[in-house]
Amino acid sequence: MGRLFGTDGVRGVANADLTAELALGLSVAAAHVLAEAGTASTGHRQVAVVGRDPRASGEFLEAAVVAGLASAGVDVLRVGVLPTPAVAYLTGALGADLGVMLSASHNAMPDNGIKFFARGGHKLADELEDRIEALYEEHRTGAAWERPTGAGVGRVRDYDEGFDQYVAHLIGVLPNRLDGLKIVLDEAHGAAARVSPEAFARAGAEVVTIGADPDGLNINDGCGSTHMELLRAAVVEHGAHLGIAHDGDADRCLAVDAEGREIDGDQILAVLALSMREHGGLRSQTVVATVMSNLGFKLALEREGISLVQTAVGDRYVLEEMKEHGYALGGEQSGHVIILDHATTGDGTLTGLMLAARVAETGRPLAELAGVMERLPQVLVNVPDVDRSRVTTSAELASAVARAEQELGATGRVLLRPSGTEPLVRVMVEAADIEQAGAIAGRLADVVKSALG
C-alpha cells in the first residue's frame, strides 16, 4: 500500500479512494495513536472537534469519522461547515485532544480529504501520520480493536457556538478596523461562505460577496483562489478597494487590487512582513517560505533587510521551520499564509483581514503596497497521468533539467516536483522573459510525459 498521507492529509476521490470505511478506520487509529503519543491529555475522556467543508461527500464522511472516534471512546464536538483554520483554532481554544477536518481544499468537488490536528490545533508530524497509517493497516487486515462499551463509548453533540467563537477570535487580533474600505470576497462556494463575510463586516468593511452560495456540488467551480477571473471583474465593477479570494476550506488567501490585478501569496507575505516589522512583530526579521517562491520576493526582502528561509513545498514544512526557530510569519505563493502568533495553520480569512487592515492603516492602495516586490515571470505547468514517484530518479528528466538550467544561467531557475495532493508532476520555470520561461516549461513538460508516462 502506498503512503496514504500526502503533504496535507489524506485525499482522493470520495467514495472511491476515500471511502467511509477508510475514514472510520483512520479516525479510530488516530484516537489510539494520539493518546499513546501523549499529544492527547491523559486521565480524562478524550475530546475531538470535527468540521467539514460543504462538499456533498463530507456528509457521509463526517458520519464515518464521528462514528470511528465515538467507537474509540472519544467525545465529539461536531462544529459543522467551518474553515480548516477554524477547526484548528477551536481544537486549541476548547482544549480538545484532537481535531479532524474533512476537506480537499482547492480540489474539485468529487475529491475529499481528512486532516488531523493534535492537541493545541497543530498539524501532525510525519512520524505520527506514519503511526496512524500503520495502525490502521494492521487492524484493516484482521487485528481486533479494543473497544469501550457501556458508558465508555464516546458521546456526540453539535457545537454551534464554534462559529461565533472563531469570528470573535479573528476580530480580536485585528490591529485596526476596516471602516471606509469596500471589499469583494470570493468564498469559492466553500467553508468560509458564512464566516468570512461576517468577519469583514464586523470589522467595518463594506462587503460584496460572490461564490458564497454552497450547495454541496459547486465548491471551487469556476470561482475562488484557483479561478480569479470573477473576482477581478467584480472588484472593478463595484469600484472596490480590493478583493479577497479563498479556496474551498479557506486556509489560503489571494487578493486583487482596485484595478483587478492579482496579488499572489508572495506579494501578500511581503506586505505583511513590512507591516509586522514596523509594529515589532517580525521576530528575527525573518520570513519563511517555500522553494516555489518567486525570485522577485527574495530580492525584495533582501532589499528591505529581511531574511528569507526556504523549505520544501507544503505549508506544514513552513510551519515546522517557524515553530522550531520561533519565526512569526511564513507561507506559500499559493496563498497559505501563517501568522503564528494568531493561528496554528494557514488562515485565509485572517490573512485577508490583516492585508485589508494594512490598506486601511496606511491609506495606500493595495497595488502600491504590493509594489514592494516585482514578480519575475514564472510559468507553472501541471503534468497529469504520469508516475510522479520517479521524478528524482529519471536520468532522462535530470538531463533535460540540466540543459534548461544551463540555458537560463543566473537569470532564472527550474523546479520539478511531484504534487503532494494530486496525481501529477508540477514543472515550474522562472526567467527574466515570459516567453523563454513558457518555452522551457513546455519542453520540460513534454519530457516529463515521455519519461514518466
Image (cartoon, helix red, strand yellow):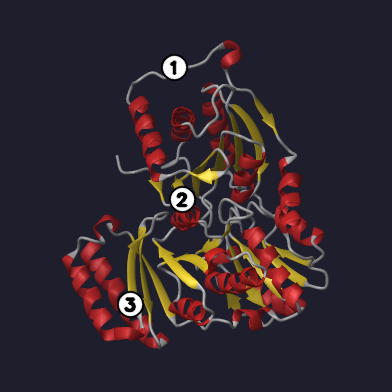
Q: Nearer the viewer, mark 2 or mark 3?
A: 2
Residue under the image location 49 percent in, 55 percent down: 319
Q: Secondary structure at mark 1?
A: loop
Compared to 27, does 295 lie above or below? Answer: below
Residue 345 numbered mark, or none: none
Residue furthest out toward the left = 395
Residue 14 seen from this side: yes
Q: Is residue 1 left or right of residue 380?
A: left
**Quadrant of the rendered image containing residue 10:** top left
| Residue at image point 63% right, 68% down | 276
The local crowd at label 1, few if under 14, some if 14 to 19, many if 20 or more residues have their Cα within 10 Å, is: few
Q: Residue at x 78, y 68 (%)?
A: 178
The N terminus lies in which quarter of the figure? top left
Tell me whether the residue at label 1 lies in contact with that at label 2, contact meaning CB atoms closer than 8 angstroms.
no
Name the one closer to the observer, 14 or 82: 82
Residue located beneath label 3 in the image: 442
Q: Which residue is mark 1?
A: 146
Position of residue 176 measured from the top left corner of the image (x, y, whole percent): 77, 65
Q: Residues within 10 Å of mark 2 (few under 14, many from 20)?
A: some
Measured in 3D between alpha carbons, the distance from the residue under mark 1 to the one under mark 2, in whole angstroms, is 29 Å
Mark with earlier residue (2, 3)? 2
Work out whether 45 lies above or below 10: above
Foreground: 215 or 148?
148
Q: Position of residue 270 (x, y in %)?
A: 56, 73
Q: Residues within 10 Å of mark 3 (few under 14, many from 20)?
A: some
Label 1 sits on what residue type?
Glu
Horizontal relation, residue 20 to residue 56: left or right: left
Q: Which residue is mark 2?
A: 8
Question: Looking at numbered disc 2 in the image, what kind of residue is underneath it?
Answer: Asp
In what element is the residue under mark 2? loop
User: Quick one: quadrant of the C terminus?
Assistant: bottom left
